[in-house]
Each structure stands twice: as structure tokens, then as C-alpha cells.
Image (tube, rainbow, N blue to C red):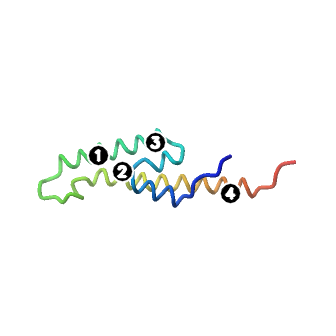
């Protein structure tokens, strides 16, 4: 079993690109789904928001999906790291 990446590193990279944290966690399809939904929902809210809404409000749908992708990538990385650490600490079977 290879050593998983540090969860904080996964979180930092996921903050740069939506879905990239899932790719680092070896879940590329899940990452692609998050990236596509971030773009789709961001584009949808951009087109349907009222003209007086700020830019952040106009892309809030995409930002919401991005935030969920961040939380998901960090959670999965923490779980994978904990499983790996527990496996390393367990005594070897005889």
C-alpha cells in the first residue's frame, strides 16, 4: 500500500482547481463530475441572476459545488491517511 498524500496538500490543491483533490485521491471520475457541475451550475446562475447581483452572487452555484468538492477531497484524504497510518502501526501477522 502506497503512502497517501497529506490531506492539507490535497486541500490546498483542491482550492486551486475544483475536482483536482478527487483526482489526487485516485477518484478521477468523481473529480470530473465535480468540475463539470461547478462549471454548469456556475454558468446557470451567471445567466439567471439579476443584473444588479454581484459577480460572486452570479457564480454562487459554481462556488457552492467547489466548496463541496473541497470538503469531500479533504475528508477522503484524511480517511485514507488514517487507514494507512493504522495499517503501518499494526503488528505484522505471523
Find the distance from the CA under tag 2 to the CA under tag 1: 8 Å
**Mark 3 lies on residue:** 30
**Residue 1 locus on image (x, y percent):** 68, 46
Q: Pointer 1 and pointer 4: residues touching (CB < 8 Å)?
A: no
Q: Nearer the viewer, mark 1 or mark 4?
A: 4
Q: Earlier in the sequence, mark 3 or mark 2?
A: 3
Which mark is on residue 85?
A: 4
Q: Is residue 48 left or right of residue 86?
A: left
Find the distance from the CA under tag 3 to the CA under tag 2: 12 Å
**Residue 80 locus on image (x, y percent):** 60, 52
**Residue 11 locus on image (x, y percent):** 47, 58
Find the distance from the CA under tag 3 to the CA under tag 4: 24 Å
Find the distance from the CA under tag 1 to the CA under tag 4: 37 Å
Which mark is on residue 23?
A: none
Q: Quadrant of residue 5?
A: bottom right
**Residue 39 locus on image (x, y percent):** 30, 45
Where 81 falls versus 32 (above or below)?
Answer: below
Where 23 falls versus 84 (above or below)?
Answer: above
Q: Secondary structure at mark 2?
A: helix
Graded by Cα atoms within 10 Å as few (under 14), some (14 to 19) or many (20 or more), the crowding at tag 1 reads some
Q: Which residue lies most toward the left here? A: 51
**Mark 1 lies on residue:** 41
**Mark 2 lies on residue:** 65
Graded by Cα atoms within 10 Å as few (under 14), some (14 to 19) or many (20 or more), the crowding at tag 4 reads few
Q: Secondary structure at mark 1?
A: helix
Amino acid at each position: 500500500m502506497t503512502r497517501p498524500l497529506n490531506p492539507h496538500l490535497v486541500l490546498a490543491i483542491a482550492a486551486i482547481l475544483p475536482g483536482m483533490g478527487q483526482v489526487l485521491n485516485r477518484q478521477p471520475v468523481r473529480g470530473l463530475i465535480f468540475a463539470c457541475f461547478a462549471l454548469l451550475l456556475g454558468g446557470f446562475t451567471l445567466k439567471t441572476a439579476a443584473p444588479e447581483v454581484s459577480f460572486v452572487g452570479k457564480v454562487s452555484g459554481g462556488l457552492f459545488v467547489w466548496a463541496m468538492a473541497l470538503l469531500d477531497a479533504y475528508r477522503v484524504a484524511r480517511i485514507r491517511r488514517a487507514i494507512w497510518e493504522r495499517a503501518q502501526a499494526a503488528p505484522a501477522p505471523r
